Image (tube, helix red, strand yellow):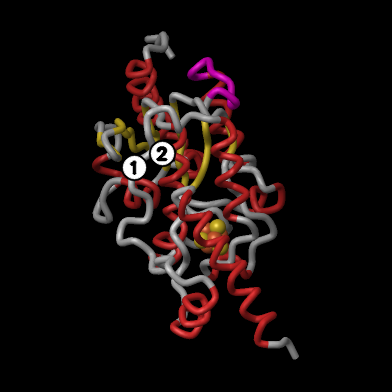
Amino acid sequence: MRTRSEITEIFSHLGKQLEAHREMGLEPPPLSDETLRYLEVAEPGIDYMPAKKSYPPDDPPDQGRQPNALKALRSSIGECRRCKLHENRTRLVFGEGSSQAQLVFVGEGPGQEEDRTGRPFVGEAGKLLTRIIENGMGLSRKDVYICNVVKCRPPRNRDPEKDEMETCIPFLEKQIDIIRPKVICSLGRVAAQCLIDSGFKISKERGAWQSYKEIPLMPTFHPAYLLRYPSAKQQVWDDIRKVMTRLGLEVNKNG
Ligand code: SF4
């Protein structure tokens, strides 16, 4: 049985951690009334309630695009248990690529191979995305940044649920705030609905420029869809060419 002073010390430590995370732009998870009471006794004077907007884009101009900012964000997430997706995951899949990428790809969530390795887009769909980046666009995977809306694999690859996306999206928002790419390319329905509008219809509305926090966003099909419906390849290539043009990359008209 812990003494009262030990418990107060633990909550004091927790309060300081939450404050440090907030300084990095990470809002605290929802806390129970009892936890809040303990925190307010142990570390008074800190506002432990999450802000309405999780990550205000208030980084001063020079603070983003720092390689260490992504590492600090990853370490602040820790072995996250903020939503129920933590229960079945093997590894949290944060994202990978350049912190100075001009292009960020956003999918919906890790699959089986990603869950096993902790890396985004490394299964069959990921290999196809890599071919699009390297053979189609003439870039290297390390030149772009690749991540997902949720960082833990939904069971049986189901769609992430609303509460799971709402809990995890601040991490993606912060990744994008740090990288500040010239273009975002969302892959599939779930990512587009999350970043553009919950009513977005990928089959009808893909291929037209949208924006996310004033960053041009091109919604296209998920590579997993292309594996099932190879006839959609031309549409994806049309979308990718628009991205390349926007980035000032040379487009092979016969590609
Ligand atoms: S999906 Fe996101 S919020 Fe949920 S446990 Fe994983 S990292 Fe945390």
What amino acid does circle 1 point to?
Pro
Q: Secondary structure at mark 1?
A: loop
Residue 57 has which mark? 1
Q: Quadrant of residue 119?
A: top right
Measured along the vertical axis of the image, is residue 157 above or below residue 141? below
**Over which residues does the magenta segment extend?**
136-143
Q: Percent x, y for residue 228?
A: 49, 44
From the viewer's perspective, is 48 left or right of 85? left
Residue at (61, 79) in percent of width and height:
8
Position of residue 144 measured from the top left corner of the image (x, y, whole percent): 52, 27
Q: Quadrant of residue 163?
A: bottom left
Is 130 inside the magenta-drawn segment? no
Asked whether the viewer can see residue 114, the reply is yes
Seen in the picture, residue 47 relative to 130 is either above or below; the reply is: below
Q: For the point 25% across and 36% down, which residue is it?
A: 210
Can you tell which mark lies on residue 177? 2
* 2 and 1 marks in contact (CB < 8 Å): yes
